[in-house]
């Protein structure tokens, strides 16, 4: 039987991952991003096949994630901002939204979903794109 989560510890861990991940992404700090993921973690996103020329939108482990994060850091479009209003969690899963309509205008719209392992590292990460983000990708703004 799985041990019950310690809500205080879980909330501190979740809060750390939520804020540290956002800071690392905004700073294009690939090493800081990877430090938040388990070695065998996965990330799924429509941006993976678009930027990496793969059939599937999944990176498995740090070896596949590092080049993806490096490309994202070099090619982020102007419309990629970081406005969000918090997250939902059960202590193991974190979900939040970057809404299209932000206080300073439009931004790319995403929903991020992460599952943490028992060590407090990201084990799986899925990114769901809204219509505005898809439009940015369709116009290939990540390659400009």
Image (cartoon, rainbow, N blue to C red):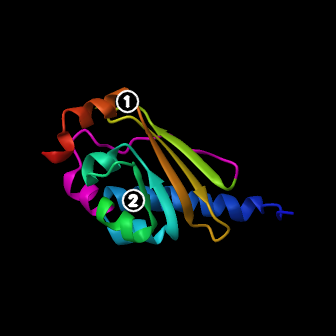
Relative to 114, does residue 117 appear above or below in the rendering? below
Q: According to the image, label 2 marks what residue?
A: 23
Q: Nearer the viewer, residue 4 or 12?
A: 4
Label 2, secondary structure: give it.
Answer: helix
Q: Residue at x 41, y 65 (%)?
A: 33
**Nearer-N-terminus badge (2/1):** 2
Estimate the x, y position of residue 70 in percent, counting from the top left.
27, 63
Residue 141 numbered tag: none
Relative to 30, does residue 49 appear above or below in the rendering? above
Q: Is residue 86 visible?
A: no
Residues rendered magenta in the picture: 69-90
Whether residue 46 appears in magenta in the rendering, the answer is no
Q: CA distance from mark 2 to mark 1?
A: 20 Å
State the quadrant of the C terminus: top left
Decide: marks 2, 1 in contact (CB < 8 A)?
A: no
- Left or right side of 39 for 117: right
Residue 100 numbered tag: 1
Q: Residue at x 36, y 72 (%)?
A: 31
Check the image and name the residue furthest to the right.
1
Estimate the x, y position of residue 98 in percent, counting from the top left.
43, 38
Label 1, secondary structure: give it.
Answer: loop
Kindly indicate the quadrant of the structure image that contains residue 26: bottom left
């Amino acid at each position: 039987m799985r041990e019950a989560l310690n809500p205080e510890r879980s909330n501190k861990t979740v809060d750390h991952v939520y804020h540290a991940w956002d800071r690392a992404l905004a700073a294009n700090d690939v090493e800081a991003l990877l430090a938040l993921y388990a070695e065998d973690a996965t990330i799924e996103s429509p941006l993976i096949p678009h930027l990496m020329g793969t059939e599937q939108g999944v990176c498995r482990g740090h070896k596949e994630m590092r080049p993806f994060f490096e490309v994202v850091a070099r090619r982020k479009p102007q419309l990629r901002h970081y406005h969000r209003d918090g997250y939902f969690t059960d202590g193991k899963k974190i979900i939040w939204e970057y809404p299209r309509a932000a206080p300073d205008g439009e931004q790319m719209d995403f929903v991020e979903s992460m599952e943490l392992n028992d060590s407090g590292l990201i084990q799986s990460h899925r990114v769901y794109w809204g219509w505005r983000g898809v439009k940015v990708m369709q116009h290939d703004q990540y390659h400009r």
